[in-house]
Image (spheres, rainbow, N blue to C red):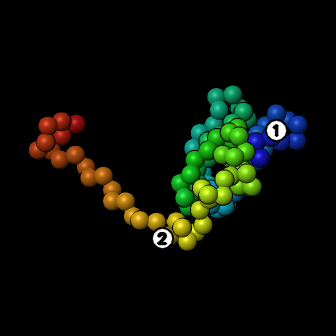
Amino acid sequence: MNTTHGGTGQPAPTTVCPRCAAAEFDELAVSPVPGVWRVLRCDRCLYSWRTTEPARRSSRAAYPERFRMSRRDIDEAPHLPPVPDIREDTPGGDR
């Protein structure tokens, strides 16, 4: 990971999430210069990374073990309640 792919100058393809090893992730953004970098986000753990970041941020093999997550870690994580909508009867609530 994070090396150029096949000597083309393109970032190497990412195959799994660095944090949870899920193979499902979305492309959130691409560089304005085609093929330079992509921003990816894991569908399982919501970790986001740019393909040009150092291996410790973008490669499962180099990602620090103490920060790795398993499917069980994610499933058992405490649920955070959603932020409520702004009420109409509060100052600034008429946006």
Among the 4 quarters of the image, the one containing residue 2: top right
Task: Please state which of residues 13 and 64 is positioned toward the viewer in this rendering.
Answer: 64
What residue lies at 68% left-to-right and 52% top-to-bottom? 63
What residue lies at 88% left-to-right and 41% top-to-bottom? 6
Residue 8 place in picture, x, y as percent: 85, 35
Q: Amino acid at mark 1?
A: Thr
- Drawn side of residue 51 relative to residue 43, left or right: right
**Dot 2, crowdedness within 10 Å: few (<14), some or many (≥20)?**
few
- Drawn side of residue 78 relative to residue 73, left or right: left
Q: Quadrant of the C terminus?
A: top left
Task: Please state which of residues 12 and 62 is positioned toward the viewer in this rendering.
Answer: 62
Q: Label 1, on which residue?
A: 4
* Badge count: 2
**Dot 1, crowdedness within 10 Å: few (<14), some or many (≥20)?**
some
What element does badge 2 sit on?
A: loop
Residue 4 place in picture, x, y as percent: 82, 38
What element does badge 1 sit on?
A: loop
Q: Label 2, on which residue?
A: 76
What residue lies at 75% left-to-right and 55% top-to-bottom? 61
